Image (cartoon, grey):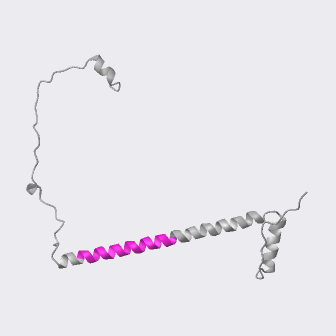
Amino acid sequence: MSERQNAFTIKTNRLSDEVYNQLATYAKSRKLGDYISSLILRDLDDSSTERKTMEDTKTYEMFEHIKNELSELKVLAQTTGFVGSNTFKEEEPSKVPQLNEGKIADLENISGSLDDDDLEEYSDF
């Protein structure tokens, strides 16, 4: 039987006895790999949460910038006379032109029929 090789070695002079003993306990119970893996996954999840928070912050800053720019444009438009205070006033219905398109046919007598062959073609009738 061949001897097992260590996958990695931790070399540090900052490892307290308390931390070393905790790692030794996990190693003896053969749970050290799972423990280290869970720590790394937690760190990765935290970094993705931090990244999401940064993206949210940038989005909020961009939104605020756009809102400020829009406010400045509205003020500029009003001061230059480009738009008045009643810009978005609805028109009265009497001033809106009525559109009449096409011809309206008023037929009192309608004639026609459907054959059974026509119904076979469209089975959803």
Residue at 28% over, 75% down: 71
Q: Is residue 59 shown above or below 1?
A: below
The quarter in which the N terminus is drawn is: bottom right
Residue 5 placed where, x, y %?
83, 64
Residue at 10% over, 31% down: 106
Q: Is residue 125 shown above or below 49?
A: above
Q: Quadrant of residue 111?
A: top left
Residue 87 placed where, x, y %?
17, 68
The quarter in which the C terminus is drawn is: top left
Residue 47 placed where, x, y %?
59, 70
Q: Quadrant of residue 77?
A: bottom left
Q: Which residues are magenta?
A: 53-74
**Front residue (pair 109, 11):** 11
Residue at the limit of the structure toward the right, as seen here: 1
Residue 17 placed where, x, y %?
81, 79
In the rendered image, residue 66 lying in the magenta stretch gets the answer: yes
Magenta region, mostly helix, strand or loop?
Answer: helix
In the rendered image, residue 25 lying in the magenta stretch gets the answer: no
